[in-house]
Image (spheres, grey):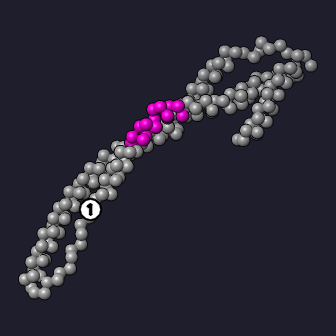
Amino acid sequence: MSSQAANIIFALFALGFLSTLWLTALARFQPIAQKLFHLMAIGRFVVLLAVLSSQCIDWWFINPQIEQYQQRVASLAHESEQSNYPQAAKESDATNFLGFVRQLSQQWEQLTHDVVAQKDKLAQLADIAESSVVDLMTLMALYLLKTLILPLLFIFLCRLGLSRLFTAMPVSSVNRIPS
C-alpha cells in the first residue's frame, strides 16, 4: 500500500474514532472504531519495527554464517571444476605391425592409468558432493530463518507486546462531548 493511501485510511479511522468519542449518537460504534484505529496506527509501525529487528539479527548473527557457508560451497564447486578428464588416445603413426602393437600397448597402459586416476577423482568428487550437501542444507535453513521465520517472529512479538499495552490502557476514561 502506498504511503499516501495509508495516510488517508489512517486519517479516516482517526476521524471515525474521534467522532465516536465526541458524539453520543455514535457511541455504540466506539469499540469497533477504537480497534480499527489501533490496528491502523500500530500496524504501520509494527512492520517497520519487525523489519528493523530482523535486519539487526541478520547483520549480527546470520550474515556472517551465510558468508562462511557460501565461501565453503564456492570452494567445493571450484574443486569439482578442477577435475581432469582422460585424454583421447592419439592416432598411431606406426607403419609396421610391431610399432603398431607397441604403440597400442602404450596407449592401453595410459588408458588404464587414466581410468584408475579418473576413478579416484570421481571418488574425491563424491566426497566433495557429500560434504557440500550439509553446507547447502545449512544455507537453505539460514535463508529460511532470515527471510521468513525471523520477520514473522518479530511481528508476532510486536503484536503480543502492543496488545498487552493497549489492554492495560482503556479509552473509556475519556470524557464525551454531548451532541
Assess disc 1: are there few (<14), some (14-19) or many (≥20) residues with their C-alpha within 10 Å of its C-alpha: few
Q: Which of these two is toward me, 139 or 38? A: 139
Is 68 placed left or right of 96 in the picture? right
Task: Give the farthest residue toward the right.
Answer: 179
**Picture quarter with the C terminus:** top right
Q: What's the residue at 35%, 45% (across, down)?
A: 72
> What's the magenta region?
55-69
Q: What's the residue at 21%, 76% (across, down)?
A: 90
Query: In which quarter of the view is residue 178 placed?
Result: top right
Is 159 placed left or right of 140 in the picture? right
Is 113 placed left or right of 2 in the picture? left
Tell me the amino acid under the disc marked 1: Asn
In the image, residue 176 above or below residue 11: above
Query: In which quarter of the view is residue 28 placed?
Result: top right
Q: Is residue 59 magenta?
A: yes
In the image, residue 22 above or below residue 135: above
At which x and y percent is residue 39? 70, 29
At which x and y percent is residue 35? 72, 26
Where is mark 1, residue-wise?
Answer: 84
Q: What's the residue at 15%, 64% (across, down)?
A: 113
Q: Which of these two is toward me, 102 or 45? A: 102
